[in-house]
Image: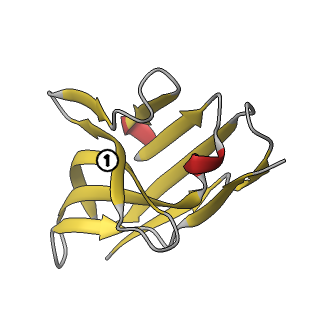
Amino acid sequence: QVLLMESGGGLVQPGGSLRLSCAASGSILSINAMGWYRQAPGKERELVARDIRGDGTRYADSVKGRFTCSRDNAKNTVYLQMNSLKPEDTAVYYCNADVVSYLGRSGDFWGPGTQVTVSS
C-alpha cells in the first residue's frame, strides 16, 4: 500500500525555525497533491499548506509569509520550512497526500503526525 512518514518536529523557541519532511512510499503511480495539516489540542484539524500538481501551493492565512511548502517529486517527498514560529503554531502536524496507486486503494493518505511545540 502507501505509507507516509513525517520527521523533523520538536521543541523550538518563539521566533525560531523548524523544517518538517514527509516521504511517501509504496505502490505509488503518481501524487496529485501533497501537503500539511495540523491539529492543536481541542481544535479541529486545519490545512497549513498544500502543493497541488499544476495548480501551485495554497497556504493558510495564518502561515503566509512564514512557512514554505515544497516538493521533491523524484523522491515523493514534501517539506515544510517553518520560520518565525509562534506559540499558536504548536500542534501535531500531519502529512497528507492524494495518491494514485497501482495496487489497492487510491485517494488520501495520512502520516502518523509529528509534534511541533513552540515555547520559551
The residue depicted at 61 percent of the width and 55 percent of the height is 90
The count of marks equals 1
Q: Which residue is mark 1?
A: 34
Instruction: Please tell me which residue lies in front, 2 or 47.
Output: 47
Q: Within the image, what quadrant is residue 52 found in?
A: top left
Residue 67 percent across, percent down from the top left: 50, 30
The residue depicted at 52 percent of the width and 64 percent of the height is 5
**Which color scheme does this rendered protein use?**
secondary structure
Q: Looking at the image, is 71 positioned above or below residue 91? A: above
Image side of residue 119 versus residue 34, left or right:
right
Q: Looking at the image, is 115 positioned above or below residue 90? A: below
Image side of residue 6 versus residue 14, left or right:
left
Residue 80 percent across, percent down from the top left: 52, 39
In this view, the residue farthest toward the top is: 65
Instruction: Please tell me which residue lies in front, 94 or 64.
Output: 64
Q: Within the image, what quadrant is residue 62 found in?
A: top left
Please state which amino acid type lies under the numbered disc 1.
Met
The kind of secondary structure element at disc 1 is strand
The residue depicted at 31 percent of the width and 47 percent of the height is 34
The residue depicted at 19 percent of the width and 74 percent of the height is 103
Image side of residue 19 versus residue 14, left or right:
left
Q: Looking at the image, is 11 positioned above or below residue 49? A: below
Instruction: Please tell me which residue lies in front, 2 or 103.
Output: 2
Image side of residue 99 versus residue 35, left or right:
left
Residue 41 percent across, percent down from the top left: 52, 71
Residue 118 percent across, percent down from the top left: 71, 49
